[in-house]
Image (cartoon, coloured by chain):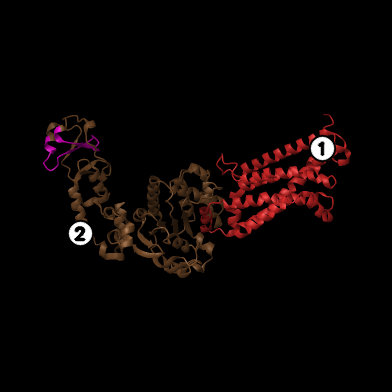
Chain colours: A red, B brown
Amino acid sequence: MNRFFDIPSDLQHSWAGLIGLHLREALLPVLGGLVLALPLAQLCVRLRWLYPPVLWVTTVLYAIPSLAFFVVLIDYTGQTEVTVMIPLTVYTLVVLVPAIVDGVRSVPPETLAAAAAMGFGPVRRYAQVQLPIAVPAIIAGLRVATVSSISLVSVGTLIGNQGALGNLLHDATIYNRPELAWNAVLTMAVLAILADVLLVGVRVLLTPWMPSGTAGRGQGRGRKEAAAR
Amino acid sequence: MIRIDSVTKRYPDGTVAVDRLSLEIPDRAITVLVGPSGCGKTTTLRMINRMVEPSEGTISIDGRDTRQQPVNTLRRSMGYVIQNAGLFQHRTIVDNIATVPRLLGWSKDRARARARELMERVGLDASLARRYPYQLSGGQQQRVGVARALASDPPVLLMDEPFSAVDPVVRKGLQDELLRIQDELGKTIVFVTHDIDEAVKLGTMVAVLRTGGRLAQFAPPAELLTNPADAFVEDFLGADRGIRRLSFFSSAGLELLTAPIVAVDASAEQIAARATEDVPYLLVTGLDGRPLGWSEPGALTAGQVDTGRLLPCGRPFAAGRDSLRAALDCAVLSPTGWAVAVDGEGRAAGVVSQAAIGEAIRGAHANDTTGTTGFAGAPDLAAVQKAAR
């Protein structure tokens, strides 16, 4: 047990260092995905015909194995973190785009009519009415995207130890040290749970206006897709 | 004055929602647009603040075409109340009400102070200020909707079926509240409803629209009930318009009999003196003068009447303040066929028979000239209508 946190030197990081690396590789793609998904979702809300093809494309992209992404990307971005993070960013879209679109569409029509009648222009209406009301749905999407991203980072180990905590899995086999595999799996699970709890906390802080008891609203779709993966 | 001048709204698929509609909406009065679904009443309302753009025709306010100013400036100059209130669920009550002042650039403190003032005006408790919409009842939410529309003190208020989604008791409360607020503020209100009773109750002028967006009749409610322009309007007004029309006649002219009233502690002589041949019953009142119930003279015990054995007298009407409709209703519901009138303090003021009320109705119809004066009679009718409330 005393060798549980004894990280092999080929990884060039302490356990805490690997955690930091892992979080960066997992969370930057979620952030990037959100930045991409917000305007994309708004386009889908405004142009209804665009939503089905966008949904189709994000689903197809999600179906591409990360290894195939790596093969293509490695010519451009090399054996780096960026090569790992690009597919992860693309994967988050399949959850985030529908979460935001459904959230924005769930704003009651009379609320929108009232906003228009009070003289809100389209930009103000999106920023001050639609987006805040979509926050619970967006965060539900972020929870799924974050948890799946934290687990997916480990595939980075395939392109030369870019998998952060996932690299421990590889080291466990080559050094015959199963405790390293336990370390990787348990640490990732704890990180995923903590990230999820944190996001729920953010949601509670941002939405004091929500009736208690409806907290899980809007995350059904994301959950199902994560389970299917 | 809002002037709607031969306005047509035609949608790209060819549907005509509003067809060459012309209306002159008077200032500082409630104008109700009423009609069945698909008659274009909401479309008409939304063309006033340009949420819907007319295909043809013009809408002007005080002589100025609504298209002459930026659309959001126009909208901020009009309050808008919608069915189900349409509150911003993510904002507190006070911030919901402060929305338009904030859009107009007021400071947060000033806007919130104004919002709190309006909460009081529409009858909302100050303790609700920091709550969120989901914590309020439907009726309270609708009051917030009205307060929000009034926040920047706009001269014009557009109301789109604002009270349709609440239960009848709450609706009546909201209607009375609106009339009270209107008495204080004197806004130019355009009110859309599909409920003819609501239209008759609230409207100074009522525009009845028919399916296809054409105007069927534009008249004060009393005239509408007296002289429906055609079979469609008559049909829309419903079967009992004759009875409802009585709402516009005051009960002040009724002759009240005070003879058959005895106090609960009346002596045998008093009971004998009060019993007349005209009235087969005596009305017993409490020591405070409030009516308790009816009894045959012979069944009364002198000195101390057994109030448990009295016939109920039902809900009395307020003499002079209530309409003939209320008086007739009392008489019809009374087990003796006699209506009980009370004064301002609720003390029995007299009794009146169904026959006497019928006489008063015939007299009122004979004197009534609303059927022939048309629009010129509108201000008088408004006064009568107000008195009848």
Q: State left or right for residue B58 relative to residue B359.
A: right
At horizontal 84% and vertical 38% (from top left) the residue drawn is: A14
In the rendered structure, which amino acid carries the disc numbered 2? Ala
Q: Is residue B97 above or below residue A191?
A: below
Mark 2 crowdedness (10 Å alpha carbons): few <14, some 14-19, many ≥20: few
Q: Quadrant of the N terminus of chain B?
A: bottom left
At horizontal 14% and vertical 35% (from top left) the residue drawn is: B297
Chain for disc number 2: B
Mark 1 lies on a secondary structure that is helix
Q: How many marks?
A: 2
Q: Which mark is residue B366?
A: 2
Q: Is residue B283 above or below residue B251?
A: above
x, y percentage for residue A53? Answer: 65, 57
**Residue B366 sits in quarter:** bottom left
Mark 2 lies on a secondary structure that is helix
Of discs 2 and 1, which sits in the foreground? 1
Q: Is residue B387 above or below residue B60?
A: above
x, y percentage for residue A60? Answer: 70, 53
Q: CA distance from mark 2 to mark 1?
A: 100 Å
The answer to whether residue B24 is magenta is no
x, y percentage for residue B192? Answer: 41, 57
At horizontal 83% and vertical 47% (from top left) the residue drawn is: A159
Q: Which mark is residue A15?
A: 1
**Residue B362 sits in quarter:** bottom left
State whether residue A147 appears in this view: yes
Which of A82/B299 is in front?
A: A82
In the rendered structure, which amino acid carries the disc numbered 1? Trp
Callouts 2 and 1 on one subunit: no
State whether residue B59 appears in this view: no
Q: State left or right for residue B271 relative to residue B111.
A: left
The residue range painted magenta reads B272-298
